[in-house]
Amino acid sequence: MTQQTTVYLADYRPYSHPLDRVELTFRLAPQATRVVARLHFRPDPARSPGADLRLDGEGLRLIRLALDGTPLDCQPDDTGLTLPAALLPADPFVLETEVEIAPVGNTALEGLYMSNGMYCTQCEAEGFRKITYYPDRPDVMARFHVRIESDLPVLLSNGNPAGQGPGWAEWDDPWPKPAYLFALVAGELVALPDHFLTTSGREVALNIWVRAGDESRCAYAMDALKRSMRWDEQVYGREYDLDVFNIVAVDDFNMGAMENKGLNIFNSKLVLASPQTATDTDYERIEAVIAHEYFHNWTGNRITCRDWFQLCLKEGLTVFRDQQFSGDMRSHAVKRIEDVQALRARQFREDQGPLAHPVRPDSFVEINNFYTATVYEKGAEVIGMLKRLVGDAEYARALDLYFARHDGEAATIEDWLKVFEDATGRDLGQFKRWYTEAGTPRLTVQEEWKDGIYSLTLEQHLPPTPGQPVKAPKVIPVAVGLLNPNGDEVQPTTVLELTETRQSFRFEGLASRPVASILRGFSAPVVLDRAVSAAERAFLLAHDTDPFNRWEAGRALAKEVLADLAAGAPTVGPDWLEAMVRLVQDDSLDPAFRALALRLPGEDDMAATLAAAGKQPDPAALHTARRRMAAALAGALAPALPGLMEATQITGAFSPDAVQAGKRALHNACLGLLSLRDGGAAAEAAFAAATNMTDSLAALAALLEIGRGQPQLDAFEARWRGDRLVMDKWFMVQVLHAAPDQTARTVERLTARADFDWKNPNRFRSVIGALSANHAGFHYQDGASYRLLADWLLRLDPKNPQTAARMSTAFETWRRYDSGRQGLIRAELARILATSGLSRDLAEMATRMAG
Ligand SMILES: [Zn+2]
């Protein structure tokens, strides 16, 4: 096993030798690329007198090393190169290295690698050290000049073009940046060109680079880019700062996308879209991720992170900004509900298990393992809370100060909070616990109605997490509104600040006992433990003015129904069904909202809810219960379904906008219910008639869900077998909708196919990721799925440790289940840990999960 060395935040020291400028020359060749680096150092005796110069480097063949032109004889070790202090001049000097690397053999997809004949890079977090010897840490910011030599027609790097000729191109980036933002692309690419005029009149050339034939699928991404650029000017006062902005789509990519300065590199599934090939969800994701990476130009690139412990500084803020943007582009209510669903599904789950860690961790073994829902999504929630606490105007002032004060710097969470303290005069000492402590707080509520005064007593409970058994109270903003029994709002949303363990709040001057709507808009990432009658939930579902809490009331009702059924209740009670029938036919409500309300709670979500309440979830019982619940809903809605489907049928041209997408979502939700009653007849007709991927895939899923759909799968394959991205959907839908006892077998069948290219992360995730997303199938009692997942992780790990480690989190929930399943999962974790040559990435994850 690779040695597991833990890195601690407390050990941070500034880099010993300031670096001003970097000149890089790449002579590209698949087996033997030469990289010449000239690093312009400026010694600073005050910073670290007498320090050696340490450069990071992994898997490099050192050809040449020279200091101010004089060859040096220093031998590198496994992780880098040290130049003894005695060799270093007191004046500025240039260190020149030449190394050789082999991009074609790089299957880890970190550093410089090849994807379908194209060269590309991924340097965040620590990939640059696989390209050349360098101080590969985010607080070393330098100006880069890059020369690329290759016969390939398109040669790209960061910054502005600085000249080109036959077989070469040069790029110059005027903005100092850390190495993780370096990027290089070379290939046979074509561009969808466009341009953008910034507020102050800078003309920016925009290009989305793809393989020939894909240009027609870039229009939506380009449109999203221009809207993002305008939005950041209007909402945050942030303008773009180079003459060009390039986006490149790559098929083999570990993550979603990367914000390299001026040259964003994207997983092709987050760029390419046409109505025939992309679903509404794909369009929404493309818009959000294009915006996210673009917004990083200021929150991440111009102001970067001092060290990787501060990752949430750029990610939490940028996720928060992309969520604001999507809300502005679409529906704030629907966006908020989707974001909270995702938070609960991924982050709450993480917080509940052995991988729980603070938004800002204080140690890690492999930083790639901390690109987590906690750092990203909870990091964004923390910023949302901050904004709620200080108010919109103060938030805007604080952000202006942040950009003014830290532009060009590598900052910390302390810097970020200090900006808010200085701008608002608030003490954020207690608030900082949101960054330093893991775990999802639970909030209990007691109500009292006496002498015309309504009081609300809130109490916070902070569960223990690994390494943090005891915690002090947090600041929790709790947005509350009060409704009269007739449904009128008597107290509009007000934010209560819970700062103590237990605190009471009074509302006076009320004529009658109100119904409270608590945690409106999901004002804090907490679990609300509140015993509410089904009648009161139904009341809130019908009357709450806060759309999030309206949805939440329906969701809570649904979870109670599901829990009862799984525990053996004979039938579905009427409260939830009647509420759903009313809601789904309420044409004053956005169809997208109604579609979300119709979606039943997921089985993993339900298992987490039960486990948090101290109950042991039974995956098989949950699955059966959920099917019975869907059947009951389909029965109750049966008279309304044909009318609803008629009313939500789109006539006219396809548009990916929120209005059409919402209608399609409601239409297809109804189709799924109808197919539970008509044996799939409507879904078969819908599949045959579908003119876009959203409808096509929804009809296919509806059929698979009832054990049909083989002819449709065959037709789908026949039409799309040449399209990698669409075929990923074909793989995935079969695994997601496989019956529990057939899931492992389905995966075995699919992974035996020649087109299961498991080294491609998208294809791997489409099958192996779907395996763990099929809750009842993954947790099927015989343990076959656990074994299968472990087999594939061990197979992938030597090739691509980063993706293997990320997919291993399917095992993080083992403590929820019965001793039989616990034993099976622990045996797989033990088998993984006993394997020799395990990567640092997977070893760290398996160790933490098994512990
Ligand atoms: Zn990001």
Image (cartoon, helix red, strand yellow):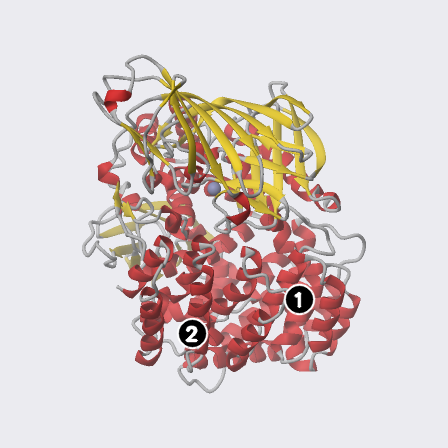
Of the numbered discs in the image, which one, if any, rests on residue 477?
none
Mark 2: give few (<14), some (14-19) or many (20+) Cα within 10 Å: some
Say whether marks 1 and 2 touch (CB < 8 Å): no
Q: CA distance from mark 1 to mark 2?
A: 30 Å
Tally the marks. Answer: 2
Q: Position of residue 535 (x, y in %)?
A: 44, 70
Q: Give the residue at x 34% y 41%.
A: 79
Q: Position of residue 190 (x, y in %)?
A: 71, 38
- Judged from the image, the secondary structure of the residue bearing numbered disc 1 is helix
Asked if residue 520 is positioned above or below residue 687 in the image, the reply reads above
Q: Give the residue at x 32% y 75%.
A: 822
Q: Is mark 1 within 8 Å of ligand 1?
A: no
Q: Name the residue that disc number 2 marks.
A: 787
Foreground residue among 636 and 3: 3
Could you tell me which quadrant the N terminus lies in? bottom left
Q: Position of residue 51 (x, y in %)?
A: 23, 25
Could you tell me which quadrant the C terminus lies in? bottom left
Residue kind at label 2, given as amino acid type? Arg
Q: Name the residue that disc number 1 marks.
A: 698
